Image: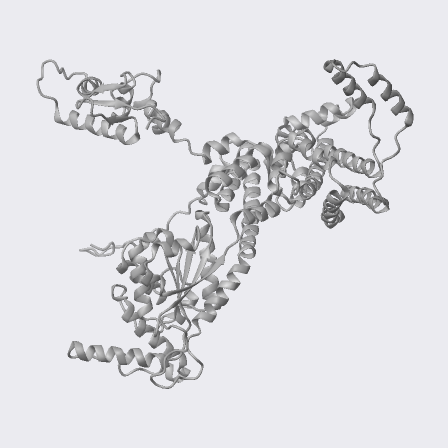
Amino acid sequence: MSATVSVSKGVFPFKRAKKGKKCVSGTEQFWTGGQDDVTKKQSYQNYLQTWDRVTEITRELQQKTHSKVFEDLISFVRKSGEFSPKEPCPKNTEIPTDNHWDIPTACLVTGVNMPDHDAIFSSLFQQLIGSVTPHVARLQSRDSATVRGAVLKMVTQLMGRNDLVDPDLADEMLVGPQVKRTQCNMTVLSSWYKDVGNNTSKSPNKRNSPKKDSSPRKASSPQKKMKIENSELGNTVHNSYSGPLVVIFEDVESFSSHVLQDLILICSEYKKILPFVFVFGVATSPAAVHACLSQDASARVAMETFQAQPSTSYLTHIIDKILMTDQIPFHIGGRTFKLLLDIFLYHDLSVKNFIKGLRFSMIEHFTSHTSAFLCCEKSERKKRISNMSSIQLDNIRKLNSFRSAVEKASPKDQAALLVDDNVTKEKIEDMLNNLDCWYVRFCHLVKFVNSLTGGLPHSPLGRQVREVLSSCLSQSLVESDEFCEAWKTLGTMSREEILPLLRDSLQMLHECSDEDDVLMLIHGELSLLVSQFSSLDTDKPTDVDPSDESTDSTPLLQVQVNDRFHLKEKLQEMAKQKVKRPNAFESLRSEILQFLERTFKEHLPCPTSRPLHEICFFDSSSSVKRHLVGMPRASLTTALANPHHYLQCSCCFLEDKSGITTSLPDVSVAYKLHLECGRMINLYDWMQAFIAVIDPDNDMSIKKSVDPQLQARFVQAVSELQFLGFIKPTKRKTDHVARLTWGSC
């Protein structure tokens, strides 16, 4: 009965709902809960602003990275789809192509970085819709297990009946006859495309006029039906052109070969009336496409290859624009950066996962450090420093780097920094400004080092900027063994070899010298030293003092011929005494290398040596590794030995981790019991021990039969242990199982 319906008359009041408090989102509540609520809110705002900026830069870089290959591919699709001339062709005239059965196919080699492919094809999908045609379909192997499912998915997307299309474009696409989703097939698609072409070519008045009958002609017999379809196929060529039908196969290697072959053959049969253009997403090489297709299907695709930029190139741009810039106040340390690089290089080559790791590092930094509220833009930071509370100042004073800076100050300044809040605020602002200027200089010098040493034999410091950056973030550059090896190589190079390296490095330093006065001084002094190479005419060694020759030649006559040991010692002494004096080029080369070494020692120390580096730098690789790098062996052992660690329930709590209780899960009980056995485990004895733990009141000696429920639970636990790889059946004894150790499978 309704709330306002009553047998008798009455009054039904409707009270207003009470105004509740403003609901706080779960994310904000996680950040702002507990003490120092103001500080946590500021850190949360810093995280949002920083991550929004990173997302914006990433989106721009992704468009720039793939812009060239997308332009070429879109041009190919546009030219391949122009199969209908502007003027109508005479009747019974075929389309002017080499082979009207061939489907133009663009093979886009994307690389093995599978997690990045979704973003690549999403961007391509949007560009194709915006510049070429609104009829674009995206097919994935997981949605195309059968030919019928693949055709249904393709047709529904081409006709605009999916969620991938922009709502603004839906009206443009849905001008054909309305059909049910289950009726979407190639015949319906051809009729729909014909109707779209007719509606496009009509004038607005005719387009809005009602139709008499849009249904296809009915045929009374199969022979008449075939004649009607053939006449329609021939007449459709003269219809107006409505853009190509682009089908994107995102992961061709994962498609079932018979599904892909049948789909290609079906589309090629309709190529005469439907301008299909395929885009194959290939992770390995174009040869993989022909390997999974039959000869008949391969002959139906006219394929052209397009090579996308490798993920390593994309990562280089990400590091340059996000990690090596002052636009982002957040930076990562050497250990964290090396961990993210190792995951990228040795796991999946995915820039998407690299950015996820960077985001997690950002979240960990802003949530775990109480001083992260100052990791923001300069304009906002100055305001926050002036409004700092005493608690926030105490948190800054507790930082190890700030305490080290205070210890190096004079006694008078030490007292002021520890007592006077105004002096401390000014000092904090100066330290953070100096840290920003130093990091900009640091990044430019890292690029300078890479330009100078990237082309050396064996590349001691690496060929990429990321390798030099990882080394500089971990320790002082001049203290590393790789730097010493690279400097030895530079010290033995000729003028023709070292001069181009110095000039290229100077050119790179000149482009960024306007941003920093120190870089300008370094560039000026180094340019002066390099310019002296042009004044050197020849590399003639200086004359050796004849007195050295006279002193070195006499002792040889006093050595006996058969005394090889003394002869060796004497020759070594003479080699030390008779040292070739360096020529002008060698002296100048040594001077340049010494100048660069002093510069790197001063301006490329480890970031942990800078004051207040804890505010902007995050270098806790252990937490990142614990959350991002899976350790299934340790997690599995912990879950079975101590279920309370993950379940967090009181029934599974164990004071002694090796103990067994009745309330433990069955698989945990079976696991603990199997640890007490040897290499071969008797299943009957194991089951008796299992039942004794699960049901202590059950006396097996009295009962002849086992409870079926307990037996089923034991069998299930044993099956789970076998699935996890702890045991395996053996042919030696039918009633036994073999216990496995890690790595023996």
Image quarter where the N terminus lies is bottom left
Query: What is the quadrant of residue 560 in the picture?
Result: top right
Camera-nearest residue between 638 and 577: 577
Left or right? Give the position of 563 relative to 543.
left
- Going 47% across and 37% down the picture, which residue do you hit? 30
Task: Give the total number of marks visible in the rendering.
Answer: 0
Please say if 357 is above or below 508. above
Query: Compared to 393, does 249 lie above or below?
Result: below
Given residues 736 and 432, the one toward you in this image is: 736
Place residue 26 in its image quadrant.
top left
Q: Is residue 58 left or right of residue 196?
A: right
Considering every residue shown, the one lying at the far bottom of the view is 90
Q: Is residue 138 above or below residue 373?
A: below
Q: Residue at x 20, y 25 (%)?
A: 731
Left or right: 345, with 530 as reference point: left
Residue 509 in sight:
yes
Residue 381: image x %, image y %? 65, 41
Q: Is residue 155 above or below residue 552?
A: below
Q: Quadrant of the C terminus?
A: top left
Q: Residue at x 46, y 61 (%)?
A: 126
Image location (x, y in percent) of residue 538: 84, 43
Is there any visible trace of residue 216 in the rendered image?
no
